[in-house]
Image (tube, rainbow, N blue to C red):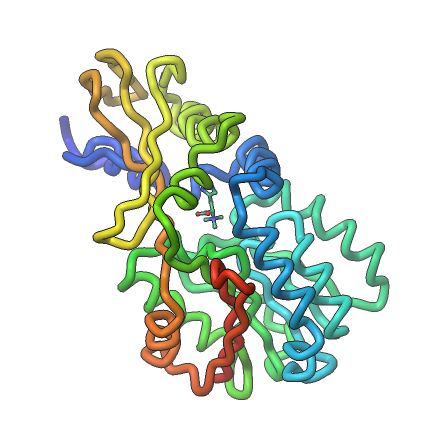
Amino acid sequence: MSSHYPEPNGEIIAALCAARAAISPKHFYDASGSALFERITRLPEYYPTRTERSIMETHGREIGNRIAAGATVIELGAGNCEKARTLCASIQPKCFVAVDISADFLHEAVAGLRSSFPALDVRTVVADLNDEIILPADVPAEQRLVFYPGSSIGNFDPEPALDLLRRIRRLAGDAGALLVGVDLIKDDAILDAAYNDAEGVTAAFNLNALAHLNRLIGSDFDLRDWRHVAFFNRARSRIEMHLEAVIDTRVCWPGGERLFRRGERIHTENSYKYDIEEFAVLLDRAGFKQASCWTDPRQWFAVFLAQV
Ligand code: AVJ
């Protein structure tokens, strides 16, 4: 089986054919995947989104006082822009750039923002955070605030996370800043429950990646042949998500195929959990100067504001 596959599917097929098969978490976010994620954020077990919101509501004024009025906010992984709505209300930026990998979801989301903030210059950029983030040339260069909520930084392994933070520092520019949400290490049972909700929405979100791949590369994954697996790997300080074959199943796509034995897994996501000191060190290594941090009373989640 030759390992060279035509772009853009080459990357996807190479990962599927690797000894430890994998699918990048970016392939969760087609339209139905983005909608499933919205449902996840409202689940009783999935605490990150509401905990981050409570921190922003409790400390929003203090955070806002440290951000210059008339800033340019660049939100990474903007999704439905709900988080941006709260932030824009408290800091009145002059320009907002929504960056996301899911184009169709993005355009719908910013339409709402435009009607709520008619004076706000709203832009959209479809980008993959694994690559350099290029903004339209006329986006103001000064007073930039990069907004990266929801602990999406957790999807990146340690070195790629540091690399991303360095790219974000360049994007923020001199006198810029980063406002980032980070999920913190906590009891295994709480973490395991957040990724194995009773309603099975996270399982549907995970399996949906196979349906997305069937459209992207013309494969014939049968979702009934796979089950959702998620657990906290304390040694690596990360939630791991996998899809496990429940029977021997052969998957075919134009120009290739692979037989997955019963019990074999495809890795779909890591979600790293940090402690506050560890993440402060990462910001420092990425070149950010003083970082301020706010948490919820249980210290389940943290919001950092790091100046360039
Ligand atoms: C959007 C990456 C922050 O890792 O918690 C939610 C995605 N995966 N449930 C996370 C996710 C399973 C989420 N992030």
Q: Quadrant of residue 78?
A: bottom right
The answer to whether residue 34 of the structure is visible from this angle is: no
In this picture, residue 80 sits left or right of residue 158: right
**Residue 166 in picture, x, y percent from top left:** 38, 73
Residue under the image location 59 percent in, 75 percent down: 145
Question: Closer to the camera, 293 or 28?
Answer: 293
Question: Closer to the camera, 60 or 225?
Answer: 60
Residue under the image location 36 percent in, 62 percent down: 274
Q: Is residue 306 above or below residue 209?
A: below
Q: Is residue 46 above or below residue 92?
A: above
Residue under the image location 48 percent in, 84 percent down: 308
Question: Closer to the camera, 150 or 59?
Answer: 59
**Residue 52 in picture, x, y percent from top left:** 58, 59
**Residue 178 in picture, x, y percent from top left:** 52, 74
In this picture, residue 134 sits left or right of residue 121: left
Image quarter where the N terminus lies is top left
The answer to whether residue 96 of the structure is visible from this angle is: yes
Tag count: 0
Residue under the image location 31 percent in, 61 percent down: 160
Q: Quadrant of residue 35?
A: top right
**Residue 155 in picture, x, y percent from top left:** 38, 52
Q: Quadrant of residue 203?
A: top left
